Image (cartoon, grey):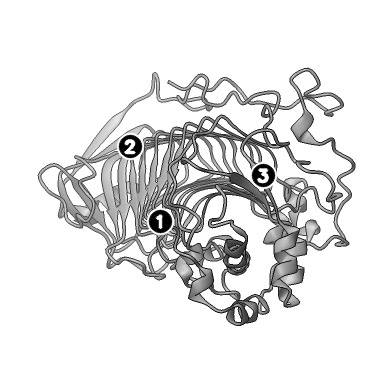
Amino acid sequence: MPRLQWTRASSATLLALVGALSLTACSDDADVPDAGPRPDAGTQTDADAGTDAGPPVDTGIPWTGGAAGDFSCEGKTQTTLNFAPGQEEELQDKVNTLAECTTIQLAAGTFTFDNAITVRQNGITIAGAGKGVKGEGTGTATSTVLVFSAAAPNSNGLDVVGKRFEVRDVAVWDAKKDAVRIESSTDVIMRRVRTEWAKVNDENNGKYGLYPVKSKYVVIEDCEAYNAADAGIYVGQTEYAVVRNNIAKQNVAGIEIENTKYAYVTGNLAEDNTTGLVVFDLPGNPIKGTDVRVKDNTIINNNRTNFASVAASSSTVSQVPAGTGTFILASRRVELTGNTWENNNSLDVAVLSGLSIEPDPTLWAAGGGNFNSEDISIHGNTFKGGSGDLVDNGSLSAQRRPLGALVAALYAYGETQGELRVPHLLWDGVDPAGHDRSQVNPINICFTNNTLPEGTKNVIVDMDLAGASAAATGGDLVGAWGKTRHYAATGTAFDCAGFSPALTIGDFIK
């Protein structure tokens, strides 16, 4: 049975809460670029897909997940340097003068550092004896743990810029900032790495576990990330990435794909985070994210209280209500297939406009005006139920998490109208900016062939964020509810054929 939210607060209390909302969604007359007319995407067929679609869509190269950059160690001198616990100072000295194509082999045990391990060379590999298990802050006979508890403030654990970099079989413990930060690099491999902070739900933990940014050709595989105050596994401003068979738990965001082109996210477990797995663009970044395939992941029980620091984290993550399975924001050409969602208290999947977090379109200029979401295909997934019945775990904050507060208020009233849960797919109804509300599915969100809990009636809500929030802040919760539209899984404009051309990222991955 759903945990009825209406009985948790009187209507007067809920109206007082939503009266404090400061949602940044654009209003109908906001000063935003005219996106022009767009046909109702729900009526699109394969025959007319792509008609008058402008220039051809770049679907990337047939990347196999291997090295594709311009640097290789083949035919060059390759050296291995061996280090054991107690040789940390010697290791730091050697790292500063590494020759290219060097492997740093770390023995099993515990290495304690007072500063970051900084790599600024090509062809470097850091290899340990194993990543150990969750909660293990000291190395064993079969694991190598790099401890940064006493390191300098604001230092990372591993801090890397280089081509053909690999790190494997190590754990990074209690980094002051990011556990493994790799920037402006190509051909990056992170395999069997564990990043963890000892404290749970601590906003002073490092922001990111595995953090490749501004890079190209990245593989993150068989890794684990725990207790990051922003994201456990993050890929940002990057082209071509595989995020495969990883575990992300107890973070604010489990896995983030941000401002990234051509990402294949598959076989991961995102559980017990504030939000499990997200795909989004932020304003001010030059890469316009596109072509993200999210396949065969398990996104369950993501109900951890949001512990992100409002001052230190990205504003987007600090605004996410607890219990969010997946959100897609300011993203395009995103495919969700073969995934499983269950027991995410707020909702399973949300599709949002970037204008919901930053309403000034000029601030999105660096990414070519990339605030809009469009072409989202959600097919062949399993929704097991237990989601959408306790938004933000019932601990609502209109100031910190305004969207969650509004959704909770709407569905508290909605329960009196027979809608007992937030549907599996929530669309904020903003994009294209200022569109005619008579258009049912103008950004081509397709929800087809998904397995749903028995007895499911409505699976999609067009929330009309601008209209509903305006009514709610004016004290008219009934009018706010009246702005929403609910749709069944079949026979609607959202029961459509996806987008064309289809994604190719992942087709060639070995």
Q: Is residue 63 above or below residue 405?
A: above
Residue occupying the point 75% across, 41% down: 441
C-alpha separation, residue under disc 2 versus residue under disc 3: 38 Å
332 relative position to 326: left or right: right
Query: Is there a contact, CB below 8 Å, between mark 2 and mark 3?
Result: no
- Residue 222's disc number: 2
Give 433 or 279, whichever is nearer the viewer: 433
Mark 2 surroundings within 10 Å by alpha-carbon count, few (fewer than 14), some (14 through 19), many (20 or more)? some
98 relative position to 369: left or right: left
Image quadrant where residue 315 sits: bottom right
Q: Is residue 399 above or below residue 28?
A: below
Residue occupying the point 74% across, 20% down: 46
**Image quarter of the N terminus:** bottom left
User: Which residue is identified by label 3?
Assistant: 487
Task: Identify which amino acid the numbered label 1 is placed on.
Answer: Asn
Mark 3 surroundings within 10 Å by alpha-carbon count, few (fewer than 14), some (14 through 19), many (20 or more)? some
Task: Identify which amino acid the numbered label 2 is placed on.
Answer: Asp
Give 285 or 463, whichever is nearer the viewer: 463
Give the mark nearest the N terminus, 3 or 1: 1
Please tell me whether mark 3 or mark 1 is closer to you in this view. 3
- Can you see residue 392? yes
